[in-house]
Amino acid sequence: MPIEMQRRKEQDLSIAGRFEMRRRAPPPALEGIVSDICGYRETAPGHFRNIEYASLTVPLVVSFAEPFAIGLGKDPGDNDRFASFAAGLFAGPVIIESFGAACCVQINFTPLGARRFFGLPMSELTDSMVVLDDVLGAEGMALRERLGNAPDWAARFDLAEAFIATRLGHAADTSPEIAWAYDRIVTSGGRTRISTIAEKLGWSRKHLAGKFSDATGIGPKTLSRIVRFNRALGLSRQDQSDWADIAADCGYADQAHLVRDFRQLAGDPPTALEVTFLQDGRAAFEQSGLSTNLNEGGFHARNH
């Protein structure tokens, strides 16, 4: 694809005086493998604190500058510093802090795309950050050097896409059974019963759970919870429905069930997330089709 065509797909989400952010949608050859590729560089000193809610994104972060402080379900401690790494799925909020000198490329994979790209059971990445040389070896370190030496974001995105395509050329395909089961869960908004999926495949629920752990890093029940949570979160930002209606629409047993899931997957009850969303002034921005998060889950950022 010509460079001119690729650049038309890029979004500039920068905020002057704070950070530079570029995002590119994947080319057709990588659809279903990669959600997007982002470039991020902080341009002012400060303390940036981001919260990303549970999602189905597996990020590969390649950093050229100061590491991030990252805590899974908690505030990051002094030893929670990560520069270049891959992160598996985590059924909870992720707190990310940086201090005005971060610069990186982030490749956001789908769970099944990540399984093919990394070529290892995704359970090895679940609930953790694995440093670049451990997950990709010498290839990963060479990629970091090439990305760091590239003249601009467009060139970095081109290099990242070529690197992904090359690795996929040697990767095993996703089994049709897992691809079908994953699609059923996602397209149903997490409402399809796991027992029904197992029955249609002729598998036991235990066997299905083992296959999902290898392919995505989590079991089908947890994946369904994350899908349902993100659908509820999206509905709350798009219409005037109250939380009881959203709970019923998304398949929760009741509103209390929804609140419990929000506390576990986002770290706060839904009403607190709603207030944060409105106070951050992002409603009109996200309704325009753009988003500031580097993740499919919810996100809000504060500059202290």
Image (spheres, helix red, strand yellow):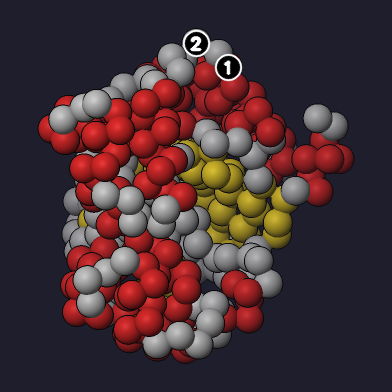
Tag 2 secondary structure: loop
Residue 249's x, y, as percent?
39, 72
Quadrant in which the C terminus appears: bottom left
Residue 241's x, y, as percent?
45, 85
Q: Which mark is residue 166?
A: 1
Picture residue at 27% right of the left edge, 69% below the top: 252
Residue 212's x, y, as percent?
27, 33
Circle 1 packing at 10 Å, graded few (<14), some (14-19), many (20+), is few
Residue 213's x, y, as percent?
23, 33
**Residue toward you, 297 or 32:** 32
Whether pointer 2 and pointer 1 mark residues with C-beta atoms closer than 8 Å, the reply is yes
Quadrant in which the N terminus appears: top right
The residue that disc 2 covers is 170
Q: Is residue 219 left or right of residue 304?
A: left
Picture residue at 85% right of the left edge, 32% below the top: 2
Picture residue at 64% right of the left edge, 39% below the top: 26
Question: What's the residue type where badge 2 is placed?
Answer: His
Question: What's the residue type where badge 1 is placed?
Answer: Thr
Q: Is residue 109 left or right of residue 282?
A: left
Examine the rendered structure and indicate whether residue 53 appears above or below residue 84. below
Question: For residue 287, which quarter of the picture?
Answer: bottom right
Tag 1 secondary structure: helix
**Residue toward you, 91 or 239:** 239
Give the CA distance from mark 2 to mark 1.
7 Å
Q: Which mark is residue 300?
A: none
Examine the rendered structure and indicate whether residue 91 appears above or below residue 44. above
**Residue toward you, 239 or 289:** 239
**Image mark count:** 2
